[in-house]
Image (cartoon, grey):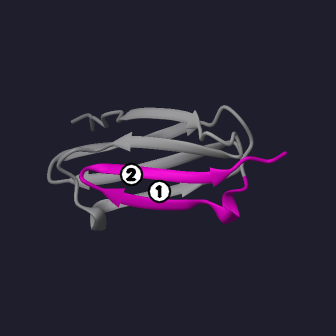
Amino acid sequence: MTEIIQSPSVYECSDESNRNLNIEIKIPGVKKENVVCQINENSFSLRTVNGEDKIGGTYPIFCPVDAKRAICRYSNGKIIITAPKWA
């Protein structure tokens, strides 16, 4: 049987100061402990398991970021990543 992995809704934008990149990933119904998120300078990866539903993938970032200083938060079915842009 083929495994089906859904792609989440992803939104990227700069903050008001244009110094940070904000990434919002909607994963409704998934608990925080079922999420694995990794970020590097040019992309981020997300993997979740919620019962039989699987969500994930690797997504490009539209500008290089400092992944070591990125902050990842989970709130109400959304992952929010804030990462400083490289100058």
Question: Compared to 56, does 69 lie above or below?
Answer: below
Q: Amino acid at mark 1?
A: Cys
- Say the numbered circle drawn on residue 79: 2
Asked if the residues shown at circle 1 and circle 2 are in contact, with their CB atoms under 8 angstroms apart, the answer is yes
Whether residue 61 appears in this view of the structure is: yes
| Disc 2 secondary structure class | strand
Q: Categorize mark 1 by other alpha carbons within 10 Å: few (<14), some (14-19), many (20+).
A: some
Q: Residue at x 25, y 50 (%)?
A: 77
Q: Which residues are magenta?
A: 66-87
Q: Residue at x 48, y 60 (%)?
A: 72
Q: Residue at x 30, y 57 (%)?
A: 75
| Separation of marks 1 and 2 at Cα, in angstroms | 9 Å
Q: Is residue 54 left or right of residue 80?
A: left
Question: Compared to 76, does 28 lie above or below?
Answer: above
Q: Which residue is mark 1?
A: 37
Residue 41: x, y in percent?
72, 49
- Return the disc, 1 or 2, that comes first in the chain's sequence: 1
Q: Residue at x 35, y 35 (%)?
A: 8
Q: Quadrant of the C terminus?
A: top right
Task: Residue 14: name its quadrant.
Answer: top right
Q: Amino acid at mark 2?
A: Ile
